[in-house]
Amino acid sequence: MRPAAGEQTVEGFVRIVEVGPRDGLQNERQPIDVDARVALIERLVDAGVQHIEAASFVSPRWVPQMASSAEVMARLPMRPGVRYSALTPNLHGLEAALASGCQEVAVFGAASESFSQKNINCSIRDSLERFRSVVETARGHGVRVRGYVSCVVGCPYEGPIAPAKVAEVCLQLQEMGCQEISLGDTIGVGTPASVTAMLEACLRHLPAAQLAGHFHDTYGMAVANVAASLAMGLRTFDSSVSGLGGCPYAAGASGNVATEDLVYLLHGQGLRTGIDLDQLVAVSDWISVVLQRSPGSRVTRALLARSLPN
Ligand code: HMG
Ligand code: MG
């Protein structure tokens, strides 16, 4: 059995949390129908992905793309070792997630006051207060809880964010019972230097095994930021097949590091992920056809070009 968040890490194994069906599709101009959302997740599971953020129980007025999340959850294949999680900003969302059989939920806050207001309509302090009951209730149902912190290096409204502020929010999430904290470079402005400074601050309070890196690739730095985080001891990373996505409340932000690019990097470093790169590239190619665009992963483009006849 492969390690899960907060569990003891197995030497040489890196855990990938695929967030494309949520972080990716939440940002599409046209809502993607339930059939395509389910088919994407099924294909990712077939490629060996074991943890997929499949849904988001947020207000459909705020993020219409994630409406019908309960229907998506109900249709997912149950496979041993595969876990599906969902975003739950409040008790309303948590109730829906629990009813749909979610095995893990995530609350999502920020290290930037302005981003918190734009994204979830409340201050950082109020969000943490709200999350407390979500976390308690989820844990009471035996459901694992992840806490996201957005804008860990920069904010689209406030600019650079102090590492100490990020560490403070992480610690509060951990103290209220979040078993894993995912550090979001929401707008992809981080570099190995700024990411390392941020991680140094967080690692003063939390063990590396409880932290995940969530790097958007707006400036092309995401793979470098993963490498810097690996050097700091992190072994869990979020990524999005084909680099899908962005953030509806961060104009201009592009998708997460592409899962294919992340897998290529990790396998190249002699690390294991349990994911079959060729199958993953086929999923990336498939979703790109569905969304009528070329794949957002350089690795996928390179491998597909290699397989073309001369
Ligand atoms: P609000 O308007 O302040 O909420 O929104 P409210 O409690 O005042 O309720 C207003 C209405 O929304 C009510 O309906 C509620 O029932 C309904 P009405 O009585 O008016 O008909 N409502 C809900 N409906 C469905 N599900 C719910 C829910 N809650 C209330 N859970 C709220 C507050 C948090 C709900 C809203 O701001 C929201 O949904 N925001 C979502 C923002 C979002 O999804 N952003 C993208 C995800 S975060 C992200 O991408 C970053 C991340 O990837 C990390 C990174 O990259 O940094 C995670
Ligand atoms: Mg994100």
Image (tube, helix red, strand yellow):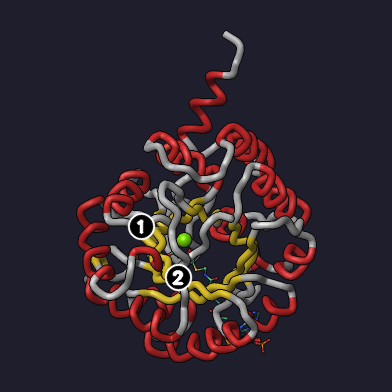
The tag on residue 234 is 1
Residue located farthest toward the top when viewing the structure as drawn = 310
Q: Where in the figure is residue 203, as x and y percent of width and height?
A: 27, 68
**Which label number is shown at residue 199?**
none
Q: Secondary structure at mark 1?
A: loop
Using a 10 Å C-alpha cutoff, classify the residue at mark 2 as few (fewer than 14 neighbours), some (14 to 19) or many (20 or more). many
- Kindly identify the residue that appears in the image at 39 percent across and 64 percent down: 209
Give the answer, above or below, for where 198 lies relative to 24: below
Q: Which mark is residue 180?
A: 2
Q: Secondary structure at mark 2?
A: strand
Q: Can see residue 24?
A: no
Query: What amino acid is at disc 2?
Result: Glu
| Residue 79 position within the rendered picture, expressed as x and y whole percent measured from the top left | 72, 56
- Left or right: 79 in relation to 171: right
| Real-space CA distance between mark 2 and mark 1, rounded to the nearest whole angstrom | 12 Å
Task: Please state the quadrant of the image where ligand 1 appears.
Answer: bottom right
Left or right, 225 with reference to 286: left
The quarter holding residue 24 reads bottom right
Quadrant holding the N terminus: bottom right
Q: Nearer the viewer, residue 228 or 210?
A: 210
Residue 156: x and y, percent? 34, 65
Above/below status of 105 relative to 12: below
